[in-house]
Image: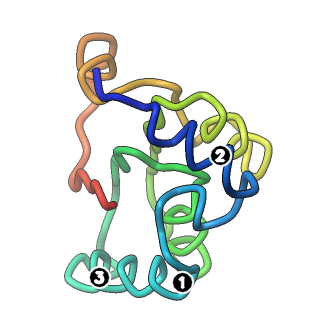
Amino acid sequence: MADLSVYQKLLEKYEIGSSQSLGWSSNKSQFQRFKVLTTPIGQELNSVLDVGSGYGDLWAYMSKNGANLDYLGLEPFFPFYKFACERFGNKYFANLSLSQFYVQNKSQYEYVLASG
């Protein structure tokens, strides 16, 4: 399993919910990356597995831009997972690593995205 201590250190320095606590320099840089990641996918997308979903910002970006899809965000760091669930509900998120997910779940997704 990944070493999540880097995120604990970021949370000690930055406020939960901020892009800086995820290791991003700004919201702008985060959303620029989302645009680059999702532009090739287009609107025909049916499902996305977001590995390391943080606070659910990719879900917010995609839904704001009209995506109507089956989305699941995997977030192994519990404080980030909890914050995402408080924002959007736990329907869209799981507190699992990718390896834990594949052991427990046989669902298939058209796209698996990992960013950051």
Q: How many marks?
A: 3
Residue situated in front as seen by the camera: 45 or 1? 1
Residue 44 appears at what percent x and percent y? Answer: 30, 75
Q: Badge 3: how crowded within 10 Å, few (<14), some, or many (20+)?
A: few
Which residue lies under the disc numbered 1?
65
Residue situated in front as seen by the camera: 102 or 77? 77
Residue at position x 47%, y 61% from top?
23
Task: Identify the image's colour scheme: rainbow, by chain, secondary structure or one colour.
Answer: rainbow
How far separated are the C-alphas under marks 2 and 1?
29 Å
In the rendered view, would you say 55 is above or below 27?
above
**Earlier along the polypeptide chain: callout 2 or callout 1?**
2
Amino acid type at image mark 2: Leu
Residue 114 appears at what percent x and percent y? Answer: 28, 54
Q: In which quadrant will I find the N terminus?
A: top left
Amino acid type at image mark 1: Asn
Residue 49 appears at what percent x and percent y? Answer: 34, 47
**Earlier along the polypeptide chain: callout 3 or callout 2?**
2
Mark 2, secondary structure of its residue = helix
In the rendered view, would you say 69 is above or below 91?
below
Residue situated in front as seen by the camera: 84 or 79? 79
Q: Badge 1: how crowded within 10 Å, few (<14), some, or many (20+)?
A: few
Q: Badge 2: how crowded within 10 Å, few (<14), some, or many (20+)?
A: some
**Earlier along the polypeptide chain: callout 1 or callout 3?**
3
Amino acid type at image mark 3: Gly
Q: Which mark is residue 11?
A: 2
How far separated are the C-alphas under marks 3 and 2?
34 Å
Q: In which quadrant will I find the C terminus?
A: bottom left
Which residue lies under the disc numbered 3?
42
Instruction: For marks 2 and 1, give the one nearer the viewer.
Output: 2
Residue at position x 55%, y 80% from top?
26
Mark 3, secondary structure of its residue = loop
